Amino acid sequence: MLALVAGLVMAAPMPTLSQDTTWSLGETDPQPIEVNGGVAYLSPVHLPPPPLTDRPTVRVTFPTLKNAPVLGPKMDKRGHLLLTQLFAQGKAAGNRGDLYDNRDRGHSRLNMKLHPQMTELLYHPVLRDQGVDLGPAVGLLFDVPVIGNSSTALTKGPFARSLPRMILTGMAGGSVGGGADALYQNYVTGQIDVYPSNRDHEAGGQDMFPANTPYYIISQGRSGSDRPHLEALAMILAAFRPATKARLMETGLLAPTVQMVFRRSRDQVDGPADYRTAIAHPTAFPKRGLNLARMVAQANTIRPDDIPPMVRLSVLEEPDAEPGIEMFGDGLSERLFDTPSAIARIWRSHQFTREMVVSAADTSDPNGHPLTFDWVLLRGDARQVTIKPLDDTGASARITLGWQGPQVIAGSPDILSTRVDIAVIANNGVHDSAPAFLSMLLPGHETRYYTPGPDARMRITRLVRTPRDGAKFDPLLFPRMDWADDFTYDGPMRTGWMRSSDLGEQRFDAMGAVKGRKPLYPVIQGADGLPVVLQQTR
C-alpha cells in the first residue's frame, strides 16, 4: 500500500487547498482548463490566488471532443459489447467530457487505453510540490463529471488508517467529522472517488470506519483493489443516455445515481428487496460481484424525466449527553457529522437506550414524482433497534436504539462491527435512490453492566472505561479514560457513582461533583502519544 509515494510513510496530515499555499503567478481571475489531446493540465493559473479559504471549483472546457471509440481493444465481455453497441446507436453518452483524477502518482491507475474517451487530469510541478495531486480528493472541485482514486494510506504509527477513515476523523484537513462536508460537496458536483479499505476492514478483524456514507466507494483490500471499481464507474458514466447524463449534472444528481446503479447492479443484489438489505450496502465493496453488463443496462434504462432523487436527512429530535455526568472529555461530542445524505453519531452516554426522530421530508424528486421511503436496518442487533415510520410515506421515523455489543457483518461473517447502520431509500415510482445513512458508533472497547431497575427499565450499574485487553478502537474518537465507575441508586433515582482510578476511590454525586466540586476533563496527549482524558480538580 502506498503511503505518500512508493517507499514513504505518511507522517502528518496531507496538505489540502484549505491551507495556505505558496504559488503566486499574479492571476486573480482563474482561467478554465482547455483540454488538449485528451489531457487536462492543471496549473496555478486555473486556481484563485492564495490564501485559499474555500474549495475552488476548477472550470474545464472541451474545445473538441475526442473522436475515439468508447472502449479500447480487446474489451469483449458482455458489458463491454453492450456499451459499445449502445454508443454506436447513439443511445449512450460515452466518456467524452469525463475527467479521471489519479491521486497516487500512478501507483494504482486506471488504464486510459481501455477508456480512450476519458480525459486525464495532470498537475503542474508547483501543485505537485504542494501535494495537491496526492491523497484524498478534498481540495478541488470540478464543473465536469470526475472519477478518481488514491491507493494511499497512513500505514504506520498509532494513528494508522485508510484514507476514508482519515477524512471522517479529521486527519485530511478540517475538524473531526468535517471531512464529510467535503465528501458531500464532491457528491453533488458529480465526483466519485475510490479508496482501498487497507487494514480498516480485514478478514478476522473489525470494521474500523466510524460511519457509512454514499459519497465514495471503498474497495475491499489494498493497492490495486480500487481499479476494478474505477472501471465500473467509467462504464456507468459512459452508459447513461446523453440527455440523462446532462440532466444528472444539471440537477447535481450524477454521483447519487451512479451510486444507485453501482449498488443495484451487483451480482448479490437480485432485485428491489435485496437492494433493501445489508448485502447491497457494505462499508467496503469486494471485486466479487461486479457485473458490468447489469451496470451498463441499468444506467441506460434511466430516462431524463425519471432520474431518482437524492435523499436528504435531518435530525429533528435526539438526546444530548450531559458532559461530566454521562460523557467525559472537553470538546468531545456525540455528533460526528451531519450532512444531507449521511449522519453519524458516537454513543458516549452511559444510557441504555436513546431515541431519535429523523426526517427525509426535505427530499424532492427532480421531476415532481411522489416519493415513498424505506428505512432499513443494515447492521446492528435487530432486537435492540426499532424503526417506526411516522407517516404513510415514511418521510420521517422514530428510531430507538438499545445498547449492544459487537455484531458480525452480513456478507462478511469474519469481520466484526461496533456500528449500527440504517439506510433510507426513496422511490419515485420508477427508480430507487442511492441510500442515505444514519450511523451510530458504539464504544465496544468499554465494559458495561446493565440491570433492570424498579421501573423495569435497564440502567447502568458499572462502567469500565479502560479498554479491554486487545480491544480495537479509534484513539482519535475515543481518547483513553482509565477509570471505572460503580453507580448507586435510591429506588429509581441515580444518586451518583464511586470511581476507581489512579486517584484512588472517589464518590461523585448525581451531578458529577466530588465534595461539591465538578472536575475538569481536559483531553491531552499521553506519554504514548495518544489522546487521554484527565480528571482534574478545579
Image: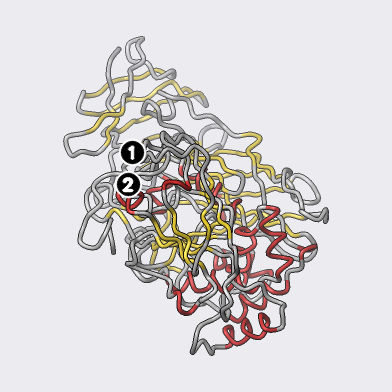
**Image height check: is 314 above or below 109?**
above
Q: Amino acid at mark 1?
A: Thr
Image position, residue 230 (x, y; %) = 48, 69
**Image height check: is 100 above or below 91?**
above
Query: Can you say which quadrant of the picture contains the C terminus?
Result: top left
Tell me the residue that label 1 is attached to. Answer: 22
Query: Horizontally, is 429 left or right of 381 in the view?
Result: right
Separation of disc 2 and disc 1 at Cα? 8 Å
Q: Is residue 408 visible?
A: no
Mark 2 or 1: in front is: 1
Q: Which mark is residue 140?
A: none
Which residue is painted at 56% across and 38% down in the image? 354
Count neighbours of disc 2 (C-alpha within 10 A) and say few if under 14, some if 14 to 19, many if 20 or more: some
Q: Helix, strand or loop at disc 2?
A: loop
Query: Horizontally, is 103 left or right of 421 in the view?
Result: left
- Asked if labels 1 and 2 touch by Cβ distance under 8 angstroms, the answer is yes
Which of 158 and 506 lies nearest the eye of the viewer? 158
Which of 452 and 370 lies nearest the eye of the viewer? 370
Count neighbours of disc 1 (C-alpha within 10 A) and say few if under 14, some if 14 to 19, many if 20 or more: few
Query: Can you say which quadrant of the picture contains the N terminus?
Result: bottom left
Image position, residue 468 (x, y; %) = 28, 46
- Quarter-of-image position of residue 205: bottom left
Which of 223 and 19 lies nearest the eye of the viewer? 19
Image position, residue 399 (x, y; %) = 63, 44
Tell me the residue that label 2 is attached to. Answer: 130
Query: Horizontally, is 512 left or right of 86 in the view?
Result: left
Which residue is painted at 45% across and 41% down in the image? 177
Of pointers 2 and 1, the one earlier in the residue sequence:
1
**Image height check: is 163 above or below 177?**
below
Q: Helix, strand or loop at disc 1?
A: loop
Q: Is residue 258 visible?
A: yes
Image position, residue 491 (x, y; %) = 50, 25
